[in-house]
Image (cartoon, rainbow, N blue to C red):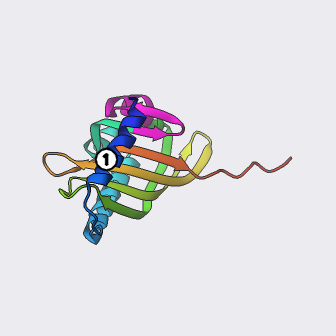
Amino acid sequence: MNHRSSILALAATLSLCAPAQADPPALTGEVAAWLKAYDTAFASRDVERLTPFYHPEVTIFEGGSVDLGWAAYRDHHLGPELKEMEGLVFTHSDVAAHALGADGRSAYVTAEYRLQARIGDRDVDAGGLETLILVKDASGAWKIRHSHTSSKRRPAPPAK
């Protein structure tokens, strides 16, 4: 089974095991506050500040590619991208968190994201949707176990 199938199977299994219950509003509030701290760490462009937010075996689906593990994502994808960005602003909105299981140690989160920065000689103003699967570590801290982002369709360039 490949990693994509594994993550989808995990999410499906966890959602089937969860008792039918309304998600507590406190969970969304807790995760929204956690995401705000994540956004601040992201905007710092410092991968060491981002490390505590990721599970070591995270899977990242972004831009049609897959990154397996925090070290690979940090060193070969996110880290190089962050070095290129100036004036970075990164935010999440419309955050909704849903418990997976009765123990409160896993959740899936849906949100919109917006990224603004200058890369080289061009300004970037991008946004899209994100789904996260979060798990709590032994200390009770949320960790991103899986992230899947999709960006909004960019408008066609003006006709010449």
Q: Which residues are magenta?
A: 60-79
* Residue under numbered circle 1: 13
Name the residue at 50% across, 37% down. Answer: 84
Name which residue lies at 33% across and 32% down.
69
- Total numbered labels placed on residues in the image: 1
Relative vertical location of residue 13 with respect to residue 113 in this rendering, above or below: above
Q: Which residue occupies the foreground of this view, 113 or 100?
A: 100
Residue 86: % across, % down = 49, 45
Q: Can residue 132 be seen at all in this image of the molecule?
A: yes
Compare residues 12 and 55 and report the one nearer the observer: 12
Q: Residue at x 41, y 39 (%)?
A: 60
- Give the residue type at disc 1: Thr
Residue 64 belongs to magenta span: yes
Q: Position of residue 110 (x, y in %)?
A: 41, 57
Secondary-structure class at tag 1:
helix
How many C-alpha atoms fall within 10 Å of the one at disc 1: few (<14), some, or many (≥20)? few
Give the residue furthest to the right.
160
In the image, residue 61 sits, relative to residue 93, either above or below, namely: above
Farthest-out residue, left: 139
Residue 144 image offset from top left, x and y in percent: 31, 46
Quadrant assignment for the N terminus: top left
Left or right, 83 with respect to 146, comes to right
The answer to if 96 sits in the magenta stretch is no
Q: Position of residue 53 (x, y in %)?
A: 28, 46
User: Can residue 46 be seen at all in this image of the molecule?
Assistant: no
**Is residue 60 or residue 51 the one in the foreground?**
60
